[in-house]
Every structure is written in structure tokens, then in C-alpha cells.
Image: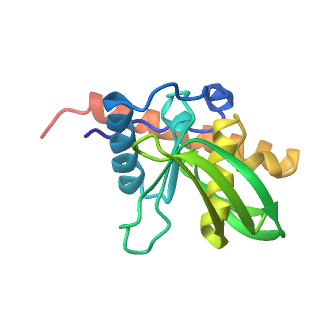
């Protein structure tokens, strides 16, 4: 397994609409394993393939506190949404930023599982929010898109400034002689 680099907002590749998976095979299962390893290491509760620059409709999720309930969604589609709840969301592609987003509190989903078998299930609470958040990624949408233009601009500027600071810091470390 391998840790995959996670794209960060405002990277334009995050806006790419993911393509349906044609075949569930060994290479896709390796991607899924790498995505779980990356998500757990980050740490996060969900990761879409788009976030690791693979534009296939694949999502991994584990909202359990014990990190032992992995869920794989391949070509997921939301069949039904009910209710509305507002909750604070964060995102591995928008590090350190959290804000309130309104989403359906209950969803019914059809997807392929890790073996390529079609399944349907219902979810509510945190799992429902996470599923909607990750499917948004597959459609090129981020949680910051639900915020005002002003908030989104402030977030973009803050993250760009932090990225420049990290780059400058790593350049200084590279050029610093060992003592």
C-alpha cells in the first residue's frame, strides 16, 4: 500500500468530474487500499478518488470512532434525500478549515461494493453527510462552494499563504547545512 498525495483547494484538478468505473479489478482494489491508507493517515473520515488526482467514481469512508468499518462506494448515486441538517464540515483538500453546510439528513444510495456487487443502503447522520460530501468531490464540487464568495476567497487566500510558507520553509531546510 502507498500514501497518495492529496490535492488542496484551489487546485483546478479538484474541479474535474470523475468518470464511471468500467471494471472492478485488482488495480482498482489497490487504489482503494491506497485511498484507505491515505485517509486513515491524514486523518480523515472520507476520501474521493478525485482528491488524489484519480478521476474515477470511487469513494472510501469510515466514520466509526474505532476506524474498523470501512465503506467503499464505486459509481455511487443518491436515489433519495430526506430532511435537512446543518453541520460543521471539514475536508482533507481544504486543510484546517471548517464551516457549516446544509445537507440532507437521510440518503438512500445505490453503489457497487469493493467486489463490484450492486448494493443499496440508507444512511443518516454523519454517514449521510460524509457520503454527500464525497459524492460532491466526484462531481467537482467542494464544501466551500456552499459558502459565500467572500468566505471562499478568504479561505483560498489563507491556504495559498500557508502553502507559500511551507514551500519557503522546506527550501530553507534544503539549503541549511547540517551541524
| Residue at horizontal 63 percent and vertical 32 percent from the top | 14
Relative to 54, is 2 on the left or the right?
Answer: left
Closest to the observer, 66 or 14: 66
Q: Which quadrant holds the C terminus?
A: top left
Left or right of residue 77, residue 95 in this image: left
Judge whether 21 appears above or below 122 on screen: above
Left/right of residue 126 with respect to residue 27 in the rendered view: right
The count of marks equals 0
In the image, residue 165 lies at what x, y percent? 51, 40
Name the residue furthest left. Answer: 179
Image side of residue 86 versus residue 4, left or right: right
The N terminus lies in quadrant: top left
Q: x%, y% of residue 49?
A: 51, 37
Name the residue at 87% across, 44% down.
149
Is residue 105 visible from the viewing direction of this image?
yes
Q: Is residue 107 above or below residue 175?
A: below
What kind of colouring is applied to the model shown? rainbow
Mark yes or no: residue 158 visible.
no
Residue at horizontal 45%, vertical 71%?
64
Q: Residue 159, percent across and down?
A: 62, 43
User: On screen, 14 above or below 71?
Assistant: above
- Residue 41 in which image quadrant: bottom left
Percent across and percent down for residue 128 are 66, 63
Q: Foreground residue, 66 or 161?
A: 66
Amino acid at each position: 500500500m502507498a500514501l497518495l498525495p492529496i490535492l488542496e483547494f484551489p487546485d483546478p484538478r479538484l474541479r474535474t468530474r470523475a468518470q464511471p468505473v468500467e471494471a472492478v479489478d485488482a488495480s482498482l482494489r489497490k487504489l482503494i487500499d491506497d485511498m484507505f491508507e491515505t485517509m486513515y493517515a491524514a486523518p480523515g473520515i472520507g476520501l474521493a478518488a478525485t482528491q488524489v488526482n484519480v478521476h474515477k467514481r470511487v469513494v472510501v469512508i469510515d466514520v466509526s470512532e474505532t476506524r474498523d468499518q470501512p465503506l467503499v462506494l464505486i459509481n455511487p448515486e443518491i436515489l433519495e434525500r430526506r430532511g435537512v441538517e446543518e453541520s460543521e464540515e471539514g475536508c482533507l483538500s481544504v486543510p484546517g478549515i471548517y464551516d457549516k453546510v446544509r445537507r440532507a439528513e437521510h440518503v438512500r444510495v445505490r453503489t457497487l461494493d469493493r467486489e463490484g456487487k450492486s448494493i443499496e443502503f440508507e444512511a443518516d447522520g454523519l454517514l449521510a453527510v460524509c457520503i454527500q460530501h464525497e459524492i460532491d468531490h466526484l462531481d467537482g464540487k467542494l464544501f466551500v462552494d456552499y459558502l459565500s464568495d467572500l468566505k471562499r476567497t478568504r479561505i483560498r487566500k489563507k491556504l495559498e499563504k500557508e502553502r507559500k510558507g511551507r514551500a519557503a520553509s522546506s527550501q530553507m531546510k534544503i539549503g541549511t547545512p547540517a551541524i
